[in-house]
Image (spheres, grey):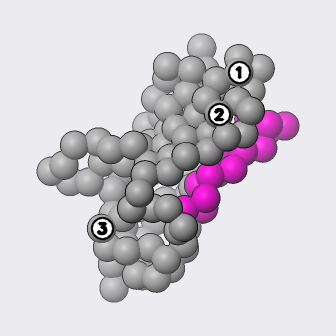
């Protein structure tokens, strides 16, 4: 079973950047897409971004132009580069692949 593990979260000031990682051994060989989701306190989980086994990508409207999803198949790792962060990006970010969820990594954008 593929088990994603996220890292890279933290506290950053508005306008700053973070790069999240999702390492999931086996997602490449199983040809699974990888998606990032986030859940802010008191809100429902929302989809953020997605990368297909072929490298196609898609983004939720509020992060387009600010977030970039990439992958390194050699290490079975997907990255989410987040630039121009806003307070409303504060949330627990989780990745999902091959029907498995990671535990998440907290991102807090605050001055």
Q: Is residue 6 visible?
A: no
Q: Is residue 32 above or below residue 79?
A: above
Q: Is residue 86 above or below residue 22?
A: below
Q: Residue at x 26, y 54 (%)?
A: 40
**Comparing marks 3 and 2, which lies closer to the viewer?**
2
Residue 28's x, y, as percent?
Answer: 74, 27
**Pointer 2 local density, CA inside 10 Å: few below 14, some 14–19, many at least 20:** some
Q: Residue at x 77, y 20 (%)?
A: 29
- The answer to whether residue 28 is left or right of residue 32 is right
| Closer to the camera in the image, 67 or 99 | 67
**Comparing marks 1 and 2, which lies closer to the viewer?**
2
Label 1, label 2: how far apart the Cα atoms are: 8 Å
Q: Quadrant of the N terminus?
A: top right
Residue 35's x, y, as percent?
Answer: 52, 38
Q: Earlier in the sequence, mark 1 or mark 2?
A: 1
- What residue range appears in magenta? 67-81
- Residue bearing mark 3: 88
Q: Is residue 95 above or below residue 8?
A: above
- Label 1 SS: loop
14 within the magenta span: no
- Residue bearing mark 2: 52
Residue 93's x, y, as percent?
Answer: 42, 49
């Amino acid at each position: 079973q593929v088990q994603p593990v996220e890292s890279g979260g933290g506290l950053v000031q508005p306008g700053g950047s973070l790069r999240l990682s999702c390492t999931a051994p086996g997602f490449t060989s199983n040809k699974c897409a990888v998606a990032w989701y986030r859940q802010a306190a008191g809100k429902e989980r929302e989809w953020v971004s997605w990368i297909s086994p072929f490298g196609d990508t898609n983004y939720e409207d509020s992060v387009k132009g600010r977030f970039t999803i990439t992958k390194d198949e050699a290490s079975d790792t997907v990255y989410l580069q987040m630039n121009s962060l806003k307070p409303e990006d504060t949330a627990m970010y989780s990745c999902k692949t091959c029907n498995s969820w990671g535990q998440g990594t907290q991102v807090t954008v605050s001055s």
